Amino acid sequence: MRLTFSALAPVLLLVVCAACGSNEPRDEAVVAPSPKPETRRTWYAGREVEKRRYEVLVHPDGRAELHGKEVLRYPDGSLRAERTHEHDVPSGLWKSWYPNGQLHSEIEMAAKGRPGFMRFWHDNGVLAGEGSGIAGVKEGLWTLWFPNGHKEKEGSYTRAREAGFWTIWYPDGKRRAEGVYAEGARVGAWTLWSKDGSRTVKKSFGVDRPRDKSPERP
């Protein structure tokens, strides 16, 4: 069977139209340059001791954001702190140490404003405080201890300020005071005990009175 030109004309027309269309400009996705990871360091003046080492992401416009591990050291080179960030946001477990090497703090940087645990130690290794916090700020129930291991205070914080009912002790473990805080100030009726526990005093505090933190002795 022989094909005539009239039969092939529609097919040739489609081929020509397709070829013409291929010359038209096409929209192509532009891929933005990715930020590059980089480790940076600072040093103590006049010493070959690293002061700080931290990881960043450097964007094409030169902007850098903390992303990854950060390590801080004392002038003698001993470890001072370890912490992490994700795109400039604190994350993970933050830890710090005293110059003598004793652990000073552990702070959980929970995501999206959720509470995490916080712990602090005295430089003799005795637990100094334990409770919850949001982004490193005390929030919720806390207990604090003296360096000898006896309780010092117990109560709640709201945005790092005492709130609600608190109990306070002397270093020997005897009760010293009980009462209510509002925004870090003592309010209402407080009960105060003498150091030997032989007598008590009832004292009232108003919101407009001085915000002295430690209870007065009777």
Image: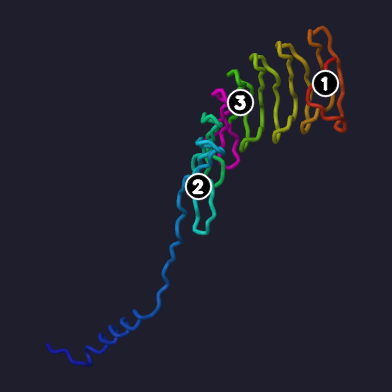
Q: Gap between marks 2 and 3, in whole Å?
A: 28 Å
Secondary structure beneath dot 1 equals strand
* 76 to the left or right of 177: left
Front residue of this view, candidates 68 and 101:
101
Q: Residue shown at 78%/26% (left/top)?
A: 213
User: Residue 48: which numbered mark, if any?
Assistant: none
Q: Nearer the viewer, residue 188 or 70?
A: 70
User: Is 187 contained in the magenta span?
Assistant: no
* Residue 185 figure quarter: top right
> Label 2: which residue?
56
Distance between the alpha carbons at the discs numbered 1 and 3: 28 Å
What is the x, y in percent for residue 145? 66, 19
Given the current orientation, which residue lies at the most extreme front position? 46
Q: Earlier in the sequence, mark 2 or mark 3?
A: 2
Q: Which mark's residue is nearer the viewer, 1 or 3?
A: 3
Span shown in magenta: 92-116
Give the residue at mark 1.
190
